[in-house]
Amino acid sequence: MDLRGKSDVLWDEALKDLEVGCYNKAVSASYFSVRLAAESVLKGLKTSKDDKIANALERVLSKKLGEKRAKEVRNRYMGLYAARKLADHRAFSFNRELASSYVEMAGELREVIFSLVGGDRVGGADD
């Protein structure tokens, strides 16, 4: 399975987790779905650090969306990452409403990533 395929699997799992009340798992799976979506399109990515992936994504998107919109996407990605850390590593539990908002954000991020690159790998991942 390639990264895009794994991203899709995790996305489906996030939606199912949300449906059955596994809100922390839904947030975590939705984040990793977005991360793998980004990794699947960033050519030459040489890092596994979340902020570096976000920076590489911002550079690529700035060419297509402009700097302001690309920074917004980066900030949303990092916000989703922060939520994933809460879900996985802290004494915090997401409720349905909050988890739904993060899953929705993840869906929007996936759409931006995949629609702009058409599923093909793009340059700009120097990190």
Image: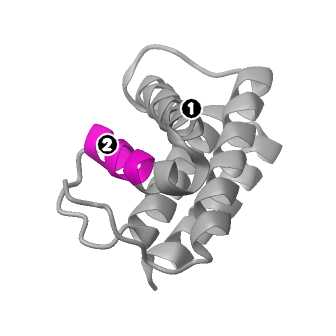
Question: Picture coordinates of residue 89 (x, y %)?
Answer: 37, 26
Name the side, left or right, on which 108 lies relative to 28: right
Question: Picture coordinates of residue 20 (x, y %)?
Answer: 79, 44
Judging by the rendered image, the residue that carries numbered circle 1 is: 72
Q: Which circle, 1 or 2, is nearer the viewer? A: 1
Check disc 1 and report its element: helix, strand or loop.
helix
Kind of residue at badge 2: Asp
60 or 26: nearer the eye? 60
Q: Residue at x 42, y 73 (%)?
A: 122
Give the image quarter of residue 78: top left
User: Can you say whether 37 is above or below 79 in the image?
Assistant: below
Q: Residue at x 45, y 23 (%)?
A: 86
Q: Residue at x 72, y 22 (%)?
A: 98
Q: Residue at x 35, y 70 (%)?
A: 123
Judging by the rendered image, the residue that carries numbered circle 2 is: 50
Question: Picture coordinates of residue 106 (x, y %)?
Answer: 64, 45
Question: Picture coordinates of residue 5 (x, y %)?
Answer: 55, 78
Residue 31: image tag = none
